[in-house]
Amino acid sequence: MMNLFTWLEGSAFSTWVREAPTIWAFSTILTLHTFGMGVLVGASGLLDLRLLGIGRTMPLGPLESLYRIMWAGFWLNLVTGSMLFAADATSRGTQWLFFVKMLFVITGIVTMVLIRRQVYGARTEPITVPASVRGLAALSLVAWVAAITAGRLLAYVN
Amino acid sequence: MPYMNLPHLHLLMNHVPTVGTVVALGLFLLGMARRNEHLRHAALEVFFLIALATLPVYLTGVAAQLEIQGRPDVSRPAIAAHHDAALLAFILIMLTGFVSWLALWQFRRHGRSSSASIGGVLLLAVLSLAVVGPAASVGGEIRHPEIKQDEKAIAPAGWVSAAAVQDLVTTKPWVWPTAETLHFIGLSLLFGILFAINLRLLGGFRGISYASMHRMLPWGMLGFGVNLITGMLFFIAAPEQYTANAPFLWKIICLMIAGADLLYLTVFDKIWALEPGDDAATLDKAIAATAIVAWVGVIYWGRMLPFLGNAF
């Protein structure tokens, strides 16, 4: 595994991401990653708040298009996150905090998919919120907050 | 263009919080005495705009402090006393702006503002005035010999100390990472809510009335509040990293535009009337697009601070 990380970090692409003396490499990728976070967590958080009972007058049907926004944020961050990982593979790949972050990101995404299935799966109008969805919505908020916390703290631990 | 720097900008704008608070409080009291709701709302809107304008006044003030505090012809104790008094005034004016916004939002949603928020605005505005006046006065003593008092007469403000805040953030190793984490959580909350509401005006979520989406605005404002507080902690702790940093100025300009949008989304009648299926007018779409661009700008310039500027 370590060999793989060493090879990845030493590749021309990773070196470019890490060391290119241009704002279009590391800094822009990191900024896009931050932007993707705002898009994904923001859209997911809005739906979670609605499912937890805030702004009940918002009909759930039209909010399904939030998923397009969430997936856009997700793919942006999967791509930019992979680039950032490749640039520092040997350190990120050996940090337990990084894997904690991944665990919470996966929890967030799985929760997101489960919520869609439970809320929008039946295709009945008007859409009602099953009690179990509230638990998932709360879990989603906790997972995103934890993922952001772990991600942010990665900048301060070596 | 004539040469202009941040201390210059501070001198240009530094009467806005004082004069603005006097005017807005006057309007507010007049509106209460005449039982005129429109007048009272105008006062609340002015309180919010004054709060928004006070942000660059404070930031440029710190830039001016860094610029002149080493000079022999200025009074260092006066600068420190001015900064502490200005910080307290800044906090009170911001709180007045937040509560004013809440009162306007409540009126929009429920047809009336709660007496707690109206009383809160009144109390905070009076406190702001009590603090901002002396803050401005001691600011004048820094450079105006005609009003300069004995240096010993310049008492430190006592309640709030910028140096103590700086000390807390720089010496306790957990404060900065904690504030950064909260800043990113606040960013997600703020951006998610405001992106969605502005997207409604641009034609997304068309099946939802604007009034229903307006319900979520305070959550966006909560994110704004968290990020204002944590952002100010960074700024006070390491001001020289920001004041000499062009991306930070761009961030603040974007922030002012995005902040004005928070008022627009709360009080404008035309967008409030949008029922499910309704399309916003072209001008409102243009404002919504501008607001989204401004928020993206805030994130961009903020995140790029260490790379485009000299910070960190």
Image (cartoon, coloured by chain):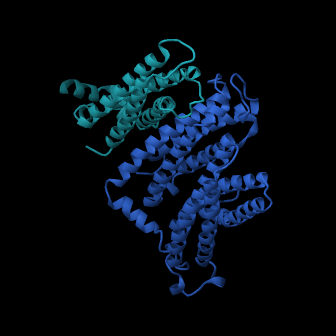
Who is closer to the viewer here, A14 or A32? A32
Q: Quadrant of residue A59?
A: top right
Left or right: B287 in relation to B69: right
The residue located at (53%, 40%) in the rendering is B190
Q: Is residue B271 above or below residue A155?
A: above
Closer to the camera, B154 or B75?
A: B154
Asked if residue A80 can be seen in this view, the reply is no
Expressed as whole percent of the image width and height from the top left, the position of residue A158 reads 25, 43
In the picture as drawn, the residue positioned furthest to the left comes out as A2
Q: Where residue A14 appears, x then y in whole percent?
A: 33, 29
Residue A109 lies left or right of residue B13; in this view the side is left
As displayed, is residue B61 above or below residue A77? below
Q: Which quadrant, please, contains the N terminus of chain B?
A: bottom right
Q: Is residue B285 above or below residue B92?
A: above
Specify the chain shown as cyan.
Answer: A
Percent position (x, y) of residue B148? 61, 84
- Residue B105 location in percent, x, y? 65, 45
Q: Residue at x 60, y 59 (%)?
A: B120
